[in-house]
Image (spheres, rainbow, N blue to C red):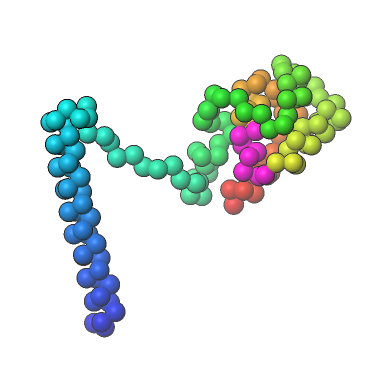
Amino acid sequence: MNAGLIILIVSFIVLGVVAAIAGTIRQRKLKKQLEAGEIEAIPDVVEPLVECCGSHEICEADSLLAAVSTKIEYYNDEELDRFRGRTSEEYSEDESEEFRDVLYTMESDEVAGWVRSLQHREVELPNDVKEEVLMIVGERRV
């Protein structure tokens, strides 16, 4: 075995021992806080939210249908609220162009949020704009 490989293996072992010690210290500290009444329960470890890993057919982080938030956020598109209740087939070309104007002035990572905002506001996208939105979101996922 060469020296670099031995150093790497020893480093991993040391890292594992340090992590085990840190975990044990954390658990003891939390138990003391629980017994002293400083906390009501030992908190669960929560995985942080991460960007889409790309290994799923539909990324949960960017899903256009995921109701991540019910808060309505406007993207300088308040004028589109007048289309509330209209179906996606009922738009004229000029009206579709209004949606495109908003779509192409935002960053690609804002598109999914914009579509969710429209859904919460009960504003359907025109069919031809839907295709463009799916293309932009699809490109971002690649």
Magenta-highlighted stretch: main secondary structure?
Answer: helix
- Asked if residue 103 lies in the magenta stretch, the reply is no
Q: In the image, residue 48 lies at what x, y percent?
A: 40, 43
Residue sitting at x 19%, y 38%: 30
Query: Foreground residue, 75 or 113?
Result: 75
Q: In the image, residue 91 lies at what x, y percent?
A: 81, 25
107 sits to left or right of 23? right
Which residue range is magenta in the image? 107-114
Query: Foreground residue, 35 or 128?
Result: 35
Image quarter (top left, top right, bottom left or bottom right) of the N terminus: bottom left
Q: In the image, residue 109 lies at what x, y percent?
A: 62, 43
77 sits to left or right of 57? right
Q: In the rendered view, would you say 41 is above or below 30?
A: above
Residue sitting at x 63%, y 40%: 110
32 sits to left or right of 63? left
Tell me, yes or no, if residue 88 can be seen here.
Answer: no
